Amino acid sequence: MTVLLRIILVLCSLSTSAIMLRKIRQSKLQIEYILYWLFFAVVIVIFSIFPDLAVWGSNALGIYSPPNFIFLIILFLLIVKIFLSSIEISNLEYRIKELAQKLAIDEAQRKNNNKESGNEPLTHNNDKK
């Protein structure tokens, strides 16, 4: 692995770590999400500091060059992250659907209760046009 690639990998991982730490301070991301990206940065630093690991991994898997092995590892980690994010998005969409249905049922029940008791819900003057 060339020295230039090693320097680029270290700089990218350090900048990723700095961005994540800044997001924690700004409270824009939750800690469980940042842990993944910090782990990702540590993996890149390990491969940068110990390039023999990349050489060994590429030889073990029959990959032509160590940089291709590193890109394969990065691609794999990103695909795992996308998969986990898709699962979470699916769960959130299901929960939003359930909440919307519960709100609609509650609103319908309130309207029925108001009609039965003779109390009409308050309306604005603009609604009577």
Image (tube, rainbow, N blue to C red):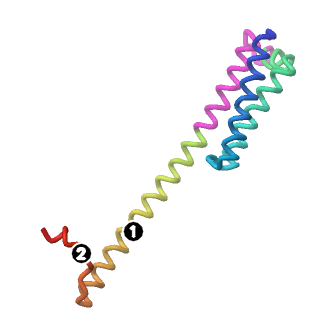
x and y percentages locating residue 24 in the rendered image: 69, 46
Amino acid type at image mark 1? Leu
x and y percentages locating residue 42 in the rendered image: 79, 32
Task: Check the picture and name the quadrant holding the C terminus.
Answer: bottom left
* Contact (Cβ within 8 Å) of mark 2 with mark 1: no
Closest to the observer: 10 or 60?
10
As drawn, 121 above or below 38: below
- At 35% from the left and 68% from the top, the residue drawn is 104
Q: CA distance from mark 2 to mark 1?
A: 19 Å
x and y percentages locating residue 122 in the rendered image: 26, 78
x and y percentages locating residue 5 in the rendered image: 75, 13
Among numbered discs 2 and 1, the one appearing first in the sequence:
1
Residue farthest along the left direction in this orientation: 129
Please name the residue that numbered disc 2 is placed on.
123
Foreground mark, 2 or 1?
Answer: 2
- At 63% from the left and 37% from the top, the residue drawn is 81
Amino acid type at image mark 2? Thr
- The mark found on residue 11 in the picture is none
Dot 1 surroundings within 10 Å: few (below 14), some, or many (20 or more)?
Answer: few
Residue farthest along the bottom direction in this orientation: 117
Q: Main secondary structure of the magenta part?
A: helix
- At 50% from the left and 49% from the top, the residue drawn is 90
Closest to the observer: 125 or 67?
125
Tell me where the magenta segment starts and ends, as one range: 59-82
Question: Is 7 a magenta residue?
Answer: no
Closest to the observer: 47 or 57?
47
Question: Is 71 a magenta residue?
Answer: yes
As drawn, 54 above or below 99: above
